[in-house]
Amino acid sequence: MKKIKESKMIYESIKIPENLEYKVNNALRTNKSRFYINKVVTVCSSVCLLFILLLNVNPSFANAVNGIPVIGKITSIFTIREYFKEDDTEIINVKEPAIITNNKDVEEKINNIIANKIKDLEKESELSVDEIKKEIDYTDRKGSIYSKVNVRIDYEIKYNQNNILSFVLIKEEGINTTSKDLYTYNFNLETGNEITLEDLLGNNYEEIINKEIKNQIAEREAKDKNQLFFNKNDNIDNYFKGISKNQNFYINENENPVVVFNKYEIAPGYMGIQEFEIKDEEK
Amino acid sequence: MLAKNQLEKILTEYVTENKEKFYRMAFQYVKNEEQALDIVQDAIIKALTNLHKLKNEEYIKTWFYRILINECLQAIKKNKKENVFNIDEYNISTKDENIAEMIDLYSAIDKLNPKLRTVIVLRFFESMSLEEISQITKVNINTTKSRLYKAIKELKILIRKEN
């Protein structure tokens, strides 16, 4: 029946209230604390039972309890907003993450940092998409996938345990060959502060890392002829001289820092993103 | 089988991605913003509490919709008076010539009995397959099919009456 299909338009035009997101996140969160408590119950005394009952019947009580540090150390990161657009000239795909954690101040702080960065990245790629489009001759290639500008903003969780949250925001853009940039974030979830390389490796972290990276570069070049890094004699200033003040790094499952260099930063484009795990010898 | 926290993660992602669809589904039944929001919220909480019953993540869609629709049906049972169509709650332009006809049809769906209504909404608004609808409503495909035909027939009669 064609007409029923048409009235789908009415269905799809139902206005979405602004607080839907809030309600949904709240519902997802309410259960987090309850779920965690259910696991703890086996070691709990009977006094706890009343507490659990309250949590189960009363979501606002559960929310209030959320702030108590003992109860939950569960932090999750999820896609809060996803945006996909495709037309004759471009394919845009944006995923914005947000975190839920028990310390609301920390949660808000980190989510703000993420939201601002994503906003900036979106703006940046909007500009570069316009630039790229100017250079494309659409006359004979219109609609071809190869003539579409691609933008992807995404994220990847690297480590989320022991009150450490490490994740990467990814921005890819371009046509045919795409550029890929990583932006790394490492947070201490108790304090909400960013974890620095110094926190992980001590005062002489720079020395440790630089030495290790130089070793690993030499190792990789020796092992495989195709592995090529810029060096002093290339007349290119981009060779590895040492890590920078705002060095990109994430924390991996061994709780080791992994130093990351974006494309072209220390090696030719075909080498792509370069990563160096810095192992703590004392561990 | 997946670990519980993995399932929880899958559900969180699924719900976050599809929340607007869930809201529309709920709103379509109750035609009231606050009530629709509550339905979505309750469905999520129920899903999380009963997560252990989800045996296979492949079924997350039909499993979640079953919970959601049960919440919707309970809500309309409780509603003493029926909420009616209010154009302010939709992003539609009144310029379209066919709009009145579409609204008539859309509102006529409310008058179907809940079982028939559910089939219509899932089939035409959520574009689900008969198989998916069978899983959600827990009846076999043949019953789903006959419900669908019956629903279309009744809708035709309802619209004719109005005009």
Image: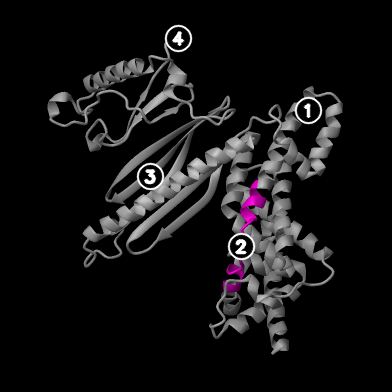
Q: Secondary structure at mark 3?
A: strand
Instruction: Please state the extent of the stretch shown in magenta in the rendering.
Output: A9-25
Q: Which residue is labeled 4 in the image?
A: A282
Place of residue B99 in the rendered image (x, y in percent of width and height, measured from the top left): 58, 82
Front residue of A3 and A31:
A31
- Report, in whole angstroms, how far the alpha carbon at label 3 lies from the one at label 1: 43 Å
Question: Which residue occupies 44% across, 47% down?
Answer: A118
Instruction: Specify the subunit that label 4 lies on.
Output: A
Callout 4 crowding tier (Cα within 10 Å): few <14, some 14–19, many ≥20: few
First in sequence: mark 2 vs mark 1: 2
Q: Secondary structure at mark 2?
A: loop
Instruction: Specify the subunit that label 2 lies on.
Output: A
Q: Which residue is labeled 3 in the image?
A: A171
Image position of A82 (left or right of B88):
left
Question: Which residue occupies 80% across, 44% down?
Answer: A58
Give the answer, above or below, for where A108 lies relative to B79: above
Instruction: Specify the subunit that label 3 lies on.
Output: A
Mark 2 vs mark 1, foreground winner is 2
Mark 1 vs mark 4, foreground winner is 4
Q: Secondary structure at mark 4?
A: loop
